[in-house]
Amino acid sequence: MNMQFDAEYDIVIVGAGASGLSAAVEAVKNGSSVAVLEKLDSVGGRGQFVEGSTAFESDEQKKRGIEVTRAQGFKALMDESQWRANAEVVSAFVHNAATTIRKLSDIGAVWEDVTIYAYEQESELKTMHWAEGEGARIIELMEKAARDGGAEIYLNTAASRLLTEDGRVVGLEARDADGQELQLGAKAVILAGGGYASSPEMMEKHSWYGKNARYLVDLGTPGNTGDGLNMAVAAGGATAETGSVLLMPVAKDKTITSHVSGAGSQPYLWVNTSGRRFTDEVVAMNFSDAANVIAQGDQGTSFTIFDEATKKHLETAGSDIGLGTFIPYHAQLDRMDAELEQDLVTGTAAKADTIEELAAAIGAPPETLVATVDRYNQLVAAGADDDFYKPAKYLRAIERAPFYAVRMVAGTLVSVGGIKVNGNLQVIAEGTTDPIPGLYAVGAEASGIYGDTYPLTVPGNISGFSYTSGWLAADHAASQIAESVAV
Ligand SMILES: Cc1cc2nc3c(=O)[nH]c(=O)nc-3n(C[C@H](O)[C@H](O)[C@H](O)COP(=O)(O)OP(=O)(O)OC[C@H]3O[C@@H](n4cnc5c(N)ncnc54)[C@H](O)[C@@H]3O)c2cc1C
């Protein structure tokens, strides 16, 4: 039985973010007819916030004398995942990421630099390609190239169900901007919905933070509600490593460009809700690991404690570590006083003349916080952190009133696990090693390059993977379509 559709395309792409637009650009270049569905009223998704993207052996790296081989990239990603990643998918990414940089240059991207994220983190590979205008500019360029090539972009249109016939995906159902049901026929559907980070229920169900997921604060756009994962599973697709999520520390109720949040992200004294120190705060340099630490704590919360001398240091000498372009290295955090006016009222920060009062303000037992600060000051005086082994340069005494506490939580950037795919980005059918014909998953929707967490030692990898997997899926779909025509 052949279904009746409202419209038919070679390829229908679900999601107009980093991976979906990359798929669309490639698909129109291949001559495929393309529809891109975007549930929000504008394109870009979380791709708009991307700062930098991973590639290996790219022209931009070579130009700058940077040598990071594909083999190094492959090994780093596999090792970081403790070999839970899918080697086929990692290989496809590592092999093709440099081509992505070239493809983006072809549509107008200008690469300003290739760096690492945290300058003192020796384990990082120099893979982070920074484009002029960052991810937002890349989105603009991809949207233009896709539209110029003839892709139809349906805004305010959410895909809801895959349509299958004899085991193959033949299209999907969606609801358009006027609330009308729409059935679109497709020779291939590419799921590019960007994972489930916008859905608190799915975060609690799937991410490895479990019940603590309720304390995470979503820092992205609201459309990433796991629709692709749910649609793929309903159509018989398998899942893998669904729990992996990329987090970043952020002060409660603040944005990641806030100076109070920037101060709270520094590797000073971190205490839990009981006023106890619990980690080597130098983990702050790797924001993904740092947020994992915070997310696991009681109420997914920690407090960063510092004194007036350190506040002055942040305002004049600047931050000791950076958070990408959001809080650059050594940025003078001179907006703190202005922000604190509000933050002291909302409870995002506390300020007090004694440690006992500071403890009361954050709800910790005063005697515990006093003991913690005393011990910390001993370590500072000794110049050696015998408790958690933080490098001495980040040991700053807490002596000069007033004292400050910034309430930190973990913010969600994007979930990075979900639908099981093979090296061609085809969705694998549950209980088999075979792909579901006509169905692909890309970007943050697809599993493959991660274990249970995000490796910042290969910086920029989820956007690099999103752009790369998008065009790889479009190419594979085009080859399958051509084959079926030939048959
Ligand atoms: C603040 C911030 C900073 C970041 N910085 C970096 C960085 O520097 N480097 C990096 O690698 N990554 C970074 N990321 C992660 C970045 O979000 C991902 O790399 C990238 O966006 C993933 O691309 P994607 O296409 O999978 O998802 P997205 O770009 O989010 O696109 C998914 C799109 O699908 C749409 N959609 C979802 N469901 C449906 C549906 N049913 N129907 C239609 N449309 C649907 C969504 O609305 C969305 O527009 C950052 C994220 C945030 C929030």
Image (tube, rainbow, N blue to C red):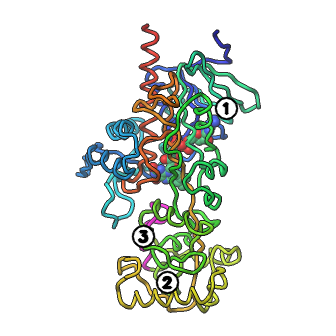
Q: Which residue is mark 3?
A: 321
- Name the residue that disc number 2 marks: 312
Against 346, residue 487 (above or below) is above
339 sits to left or right of 457: right
Q: Which amino acid does the dot numbered 3 rest on?
A: Ile
Q: Residue at x 53, y 66 (%)?
A: 294
Name the image quarter holding residue 237: top right
- Residue 227 seen in this snapshot: yes
- Which callout, 2 or 1, points to the residue nearer the camera? 1
Quick one: label 3 or label 1, which is nearer the N terminus? 1
Q: Secondary structure at mark 2?
A: helix
For the C terminus, give its image quadrant: top left
Query: Counting other residues with Cα less than 10 Å from the Cα at mark 1, is it few (<14), some (14-19), or many (20 or more)?
Result: some
Q: CA distance from mark 2 to mark 1?
A: 53 Å
Asked whether 230 or 457 is in front, the reply is 230
Question: Over which residues does the magenta segment extend?
Answer: 317-328
- Classified by dominant secondary structure, the portion drawn in magenta counts as loop
